[in-house]
Image: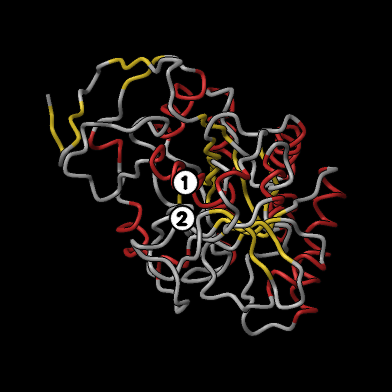
Amino acid sequence: MITTDAFPVHPGRTVAFSINQIITVILLIAAFSLSPASAIAQEKPAAPPAAANSAFPQPTLYVVGYAHLDTEWRWEYPEVISDYLAKTMHLNFALFEKYPHYIFNFTGSNRYRLMKEYFPADYQILRQWVKAGRWYPAGSSVEENDVNSPSPESIIRQVLYGNEYFRHDFGVASDEYMLPDCFGFPASLPSILSAAGVKGFSTQKLTWGSSAPVGGLDSPEQTPKGIPFNVGLWDGPGGRSVIAAFNPLTYSGNIWYDISKNSPAFDPPHANYVNWPARLALDAKATGVPVDYHYYGTGDIGGAPSESSVKLLEAIVTKSETVLPSPMERTDLGDEEAEAHGP
C-alpha cells in the first residue's frame, strides 16, 4: 500500500461505486438553461430552506470538464494553432471514444475559426461530436475576454459574434458566459449579460482575491472570503440577473476520489479535498436548492482533463468499477500548477 498525505491509495485495486451515493453527479455541458438546472433561476441565495425545489429530489453536483486556453499570452499564434489547438481536439476525441459519458466544454469562437481553417478534417470530426452532445461550444463569446476595461457594447458584441458563429457552424448556441481566468468583474456585468440573452455565468477567479466584504467561515455557505455564494442569482444594478457559479474550484483540478460521498479517509482533511455532500447540504440550507457546480480539467494551453479523472467520473456516474488513480496519476495539485504557469 502506498499512502500519500491522509489518503490511502492502493495501486491496481478495483473500487466499486455503489448505488448508495449521497449526491447525484451529472457530467454537464456548461449551459445553465438545461432542465432541471434552469430551476435554479427561481431561487435566490437568501431563499429559506422551505423553498426547496422539487426538481432536485437528491442533492446534485454538476461537473464541468474544461480546458482553459490563453489564445495569446507567453506564446504566439503559430504555437497555439499547431500545438495547443491540435492537442485539444485529438486528446478529447480519444477520450470520447473510450468513455461514453465524458463531456467536454471549450470556449471562444475565434479558436474554432482557427481549427476550421488549419485542421478542416479534424474540424468535421469535432462537428460530429458537437452534434452528439459530447463536445460543447461554451462561453457564448469570441474569446474569454476582459470585462473591466471594455464598454458594455464590446461585451455584448462578444456574445453576438460568438454565438452567431456557434449557431452557423454547429446549430447550437451557448446560454452562459464562462470567464474562469478574468481578473475582476464589474457590478454591471449581470445586467449586460442578461441584456445579451445570456442566462448563466461562472468563474473560479474570485478565489485569487476578491474585495467583496462577503463569505468566510461564518457565511451561510462557508464560502472563501470574497465569494458571496456557491451557486445563486447575481443581480445587476438595473434589476436584471444571471445564474452565477462563483466557487467551482480550479479549472486545472483533477477528480481523484469519489466526489459523490464523504470520505472518512480524510482526517485531517487533505488540502485539495472537498466534502461535496456537506457543501451541498449547506447550499440547500441557505437557498433551498441542493445544487452545486464543479470545474475540472486543465489550464492555459488547452488540451483535455486527465484520463484518470475522466475514468473515475465514468465509474461514479455509471456506478461501476475502476482503479483508483496512483499518486503520479492523481496530480491533484491544480492550484500549484496554476501558480507555476502564472496568472
In the image, 109 versus 9, the foreground residue is 9
The spot of residue 5 in percent (x, y) is: 15, 42
Measured along the vertical axis of the image, is residue 8 above or below residue 141? above
The spot of residue 87 in percent (x, y) is: 53, 45
Tell me, for residue 249, which label it has, or none: none
Circle 2 — which element? loop
The spot of residue 80 in percent (x, y) is: 56, 59
- Badge 2: residue crowd in 10 Å (few <14, some 14–19, many ≥20): many
In the image, 39 versus 195, the foreground residue is 39
Residue drawn at the location 39% of the way across and 38% of the way down: 255
Q: Quadrant of the N terminus?
A: top left
Circle 1 — which element? strand
Instruction: Verify CB contact (< 8 Å) between mark 2 and mark 1.
Output: yes
Q: CA distance from mark 2 to mark 1?
A: 7 Å
The spot of residue 172 in percent (x, y) is: 82, 44
Residue drawn at the location 63% of the way across and 57% of the way down: 44
Q: Is residue 279 left or right of residue 124?
A: left
Measured along the vertical axis of the image, is residue 226 above or below residue 328? below
Residue drawn at the location 33% of the way across and 65% of the way down: 339
Residue that mark 1 sits on: 297
Measured along the vertical axis of the image, is residue 99 above or below residue 34? above
- Number of marks: 2
- Badge 1: residue crowd in 10 Å (few <14, some 14–19, many ≥20): many
Residue that mark 2 sits on: 299
Q: Quadrant of the C terminus?
A: bottom left
* Callout 2 amino acid: Gly
- On the question of residue 83 being in view, the answer is no
Q: Is residue 272 left or right of residue 173?
A: left
Residue drawn at the location 13% of the way across and 29% of the way down: 2
